[in-house]
Amino acid sequence: MKFFLIFLFFLSSCTKSISFEKKDILIKKKKILVEIADSYDKRSKGLMNRSSLNKNSGMLFVYSSEQNLKFWMKNTKIPLSIAFFNKEKQLLEVIKMPLPKDPNNLIIYQNSSPAKYALEMKLGWFQKNNISIGDKFKFSEDRK
């Protein structure tokens, strides 16, 4: 009986729905609708199991402080680019994350400088929109 209750708890925690707050951010006057991943559960789920992503939409991973971050493409069906930003919201680097050829052999993508934010967009989005190292983002409600 105890095992059965533990199993039910595990099953319910695996199927719980995670909802993401949505906000607009601006980079070089380009408006992006982002889903905010600011908790362990939200960051763990990320863009897994999604089959599409709108043109100017992405996911913004938010951390409490600058740090080395690790990302992978587990259960991800959309090729992505990830941009890392420091605490001043300044772009440090962009890494391409194509779909893995072997889903059992996941590549770990890691920033080379400590970052507080990571923004995942469709593969090539940053290059296509002329977003460069040093560019800053701001939340649309920010006045700076």
Image: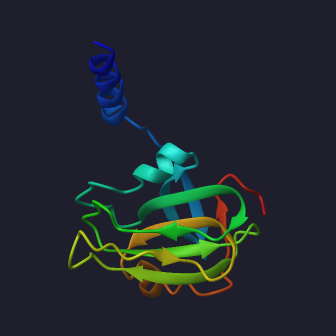
How many numbered dots are placed on residues in this image?
Answer: 0
Q: Position of residue 11 (x, y in %)?
A: 29, 29
Q: Position of residue 100 (x, y in %)?
A: 26, 76
Vertical order, 128 against 17 (above or below): below
Q: Position of residue 28 (x, y in %)?
A: 61, 77
Q: Is residue 121 left or right of residue 29?
A: left
Q: Of all residues shown, which one is farthest toward the front?
A: 2
Q: Of all residues shown, which one is farthest toward the top?
A: 1
Which image quarter: residue 24?
A: bottom right
What scheme was used to colour the molecule?
rainbow
Q: Is residue 141 left or right of residue 75?
A: right
Quadrant of the snapshot with the C terminus: bottom right
Quadrant of the snapshot with the N terminus: top left
Q: Position of residue 73 (x, y in %)?
A: 35, 67
Q: Is residue 124 left or right of residue 20?
A: left
Tell me the residue at 41%/38% (across/down). Answer: 18
Of residue 2 and residue 88, the one placed in the foreground of this image is 2
Tell me the residue at 23%/69% (across/down). Answer: 103
Of residue 9 and residue 94, the one placed in the foreground of this image is 9
Vertical order, 117 against 28 (above or below): above
Tell me the residue at 55%/58% (across/down). Answer: 61
Tell me the residue at 51%/87% (across/down). Answer: 130
